[in-house]
Image: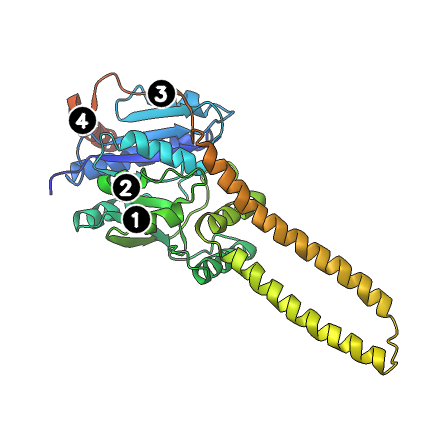
Amino acid sequence: MSEPLLTIVVPCYNEEEVLTESSKQLDQILIDLIEKQQISSKSKLLFVNDGSVDDTWKIIKELQKKSEFEGISFSRNFEHQNALLAGMTVANEYSDIIITIDADLQDDVACISEMVEKYKEGNDIVYAVRNDRKSDTIFKRKTAQFFYWMMKKMGVDLVPNHSDYRLLSKRAVSTLLQYHEENLFLRAIVPALGYKSNKVYYKRKKRLAGTSHCPLRKMINFAVDGITSFTISPIRIIMYLGFLIMFLSGIGLCILVGTYFYLHTVSGWTSIIMVSIFFFSGFQMVNVCMVGIYVGKTYIETKHRPQYVIEEKAFSATEVTGRSSHATMRYKESQKERKI
């Protein structure tokens, strides 16, 4: 297999504190892979500015002055999944393989070389999977385990402990782009492609700087999106609960009729009725909201609005097909700097 052209897609949202360092590390990975003749010397880094309000886009434009860096900027924040999709859409025009990774570099960049090797072995998809979650809080570990367990029970095919750090071949990305869904959940869509896949394992690190952009609220919304985008199991569960409540209500009715005929009075029965009314009122509200989520998602899908809007691009002046082996030159320069 000839040297594939690799593009590393990096979604960025308010990453000014980490972007300079993460770009250096990723660039060095490209240099090393090119020197080992694992990838083409035309390989690139593509940064996707997801509506940042700090100097993230300014830093990307400065990086773009080097021909190995490219960038696109959204008109506003369109969320992480759409940033990944936009980067893959742009990169797929000229790339043989695409790797997506977050800018905070909590994911180990050393896995990239192994991922490329797995691709050369014939895999169209290579997942980078965490082999431990010690860097997470106990609450986050337990909720993550529960989420993966619940998704499996509902029939959704996910790779446990895998985020959005993965390698996709050109044909895998081309197939992925045929999914015109407004409610993106790439962690479930990618396994659904069905192409040959493999895994590499790594230990997750702490953020280089800054704070996490995934608070509890976003994590809950992400989990709800994942469930409601790929399965109608919650509606089935509601139906089963409805039948269970009807059955228990029938038993309760029989008990009431019996107590009426035998003239038995039950102390506090009025209070029990009031509690039951409040309980089932809340239960109905939850059910209506669950059904409403599905109706709302259907409503959004029918609008066919654009998933993102690119406001500005920062690309090299030369075309991809006309680039020289600038990466090899960068490698030689880096070697000189190391000797000094």
| Residue situated in front as seen by the camera: 95 or 193 | 193
- The quadrant the C terminus occupies is top left
- Residue 302 falls left or right of residue 22: right
Find residue 126 and report its horizontal and vertical position in percent.
Answer: 28, 49
- Categorize mark 2 by other alpha carbons within 10 Å: few (<14), some (14-19), many (20+): few
Calculate the distance from the C-alpha at mark 2 to the C-alpha at mark 4. Answer: 35 Å
* Distance in Å between CA atoms under marks 1 and 2: 7 Å
For badge 2, the amino acid type reads Thr
Extreme residue toward the left, this view: 1
Residue at the location (43% across, 41% down)? 184
What is the number of the mark on residue 193? 1
Give SS at disc 2. Answer: helix
Real-space Cα separation, disc 3 to disc 1, in angstroms: 30 Å
Q: CA distance from mark 2 to mark 3?
A: 25 Å
Compared to residue 85, the image places residue 188 above or below, namely below
Residue linked to disc 4: 329
Residue 136 lies, in percent from the top left, at 50, 52
Q: Earlier in the sequence, mark 2 or mark 3?
A: 2
Up the image or down, 148 lies above or below 244; here it is above
- Going from N to C along the chain, the mark reached first, 1 or 2, is 2
Between discs 3 and 4, the one toward the N terminus? 3
Name the residue tied to disc 2.
175
**Residue 103 quadrant:** top left
Of helix, strand and loop, which one carries label 4?
A: helix
Q: Which residue is mark 3?
A: 313
Residue 128 shows in the view? yes
Q: Nearer the viewer, mark 2 or mark 4?
A: 2
